[in-house]
């Protein structure tokens, strides 16, 4: 059980530029929604349309992510609202473009109430066919709901992700993305024990970690030290377990489990953790087999 008071907390603030950036993102979401529908209209394959809807959600979400990062939004509720609004605009634009294409580029519907009436008529008769059938009624509503969830859900998740991806230095008015280099460690830690030790400020616990050169193939523990590159006085610690597996096609699958994320460190704790990680790095480099050439070691 984590103690939330020991971790980075969002200030709730945002840049005065954020509303202007949101306007730009709104335009981008509308264009992405239109493009998605027009491409789907001309290439009516169900599987491809599914991928296109996913791509539309990711692209609109990209606009949301950009708004949150560039607009310095440190407010998760605002980030969620931005993601939902952009997703709905992208979805509505896709519907308008779809009806426009379907009507031979003659009918442009801007009113949501008119759009709902048109959708009801389209749902009664069906608008496209696949696998030898034309979905109508509730089947079509389910398909539309899935499409809406992919676009609005994707947009919301990415916008919120932008807000939570890294801590923010209020003094220097910037996101803290600088991560100090550290070796990777064997994945044999006990998660709850690790949380308890680090939250209690017992950073000597990190001395028990064993560095591993083969972690990229076998999974490993990653320790990340973050600090504000400008004031160098805002420090955070991340520990994550990286599980690596290979699927039937021998494709590498990576799964990250956060053990601690953005644990606040005072300057003394930061220096201590840095010394421990440096000592691990030195030990790891001297433990490399002598057959490895020096230039590869340096890399
Ligand atoms: Zn700073």
Image (tube, rainbow, N blue to C red):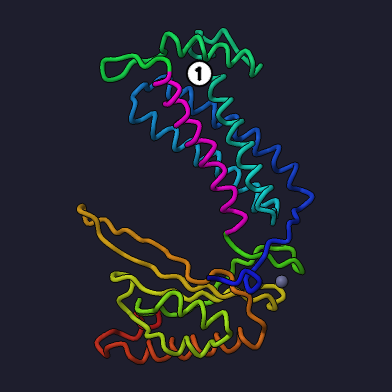
> Quick check: 158 left or right of 131?
right
Mark 1 CB within 8 Å of ligand 1:
no
Task: Please tell me which residue lies in front, 181 or 198.
Answer: 198
Q: Position of residue 32 (x, y in %)?
A: 54, 32
Q: Which residue is mark 1?
A: 98
Q: Secondary structure at mark 1?
A: helix
Residue at figure coordinates x 60%, y 13% from the top left: 108
Start-end of magenta stretch: 138-164
Task: Please tell me which residue lies in front, 212 or 27.
Answer: 212
Count the marks: how many?
A: 1
Residue at figure coordinates x 51%, y 27% from the top left: 35
> Quick check: 292 left or right of 151?
left
Task: Please tell me which residue lies in front, 5 or 22.
Answer: 5
Q: Position of residue 13 (x, y in %)?
A: 75, 56
Quadrant for ligand 1 reads: bottom right
Magenta highlight: main SS: helix
Q: Position of residue 152 (x, y in %)?
A: 54, 37
């Amino acid at each position: 059980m984590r103690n939330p008071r020991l971790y980075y907390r969002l200030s709730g603030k945002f840049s005065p530029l954020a509303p202007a950036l949101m306007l730009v993102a709104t335009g981008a979401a509308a264009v992405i929604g239109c493009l998605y529908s027009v491409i789907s209209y001309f290439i009516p394959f169900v599987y491809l349309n599914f991928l296109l809807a996913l791509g539309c959600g990711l692209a609109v979400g990209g606009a949301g992510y950009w708004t949150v990062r560039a607009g310095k939004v440190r407010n998760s509720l605002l980030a969620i609202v931005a993601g939902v609004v952009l997703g709905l605009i992208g979805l509505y634009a896709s519907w308008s473009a779809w009806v426009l294409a379907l009507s031979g580029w003659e009918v442009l519907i801007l009113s949501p109430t008119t759009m709902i009436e048109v959708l009801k008529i389209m749902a009664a008769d069906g608008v496209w066919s696949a696998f030898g059938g034309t979905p109508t009624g509730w089947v079509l509503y389910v398909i539309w709901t899935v499409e809406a969830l992919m676009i609005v859900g994707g947009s919301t998740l990415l916008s919120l992700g932008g807000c939570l991806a890294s801590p923010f230095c209020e003094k220097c008015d910037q996101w803290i993305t600088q991560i100090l280099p550290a070796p990777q460690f064997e994945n044999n830690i006990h998660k709850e024990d690790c949380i308890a030790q680090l939250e209690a400020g017992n950073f000597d616990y990190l001395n028990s970690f064993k560095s591993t050169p083969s972690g990229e193939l076998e999974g490993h523990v990653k320790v990340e030290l973050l600090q504000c590159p400008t004031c160098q006085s805002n420090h955070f610690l991340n520990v994550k377990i990286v599980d690596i597996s290979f699927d039937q096609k021998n494709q590498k699958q990576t799964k990250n489990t956060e053990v601690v994320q953005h644990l606040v460190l005072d300057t003394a704790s930061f220096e201590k953790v840095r010394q421990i990680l440096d000592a691990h790095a030195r030990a790891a480099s001297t433990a490399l087999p002598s057959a490895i050439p020096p230039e590869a070691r340096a890399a």
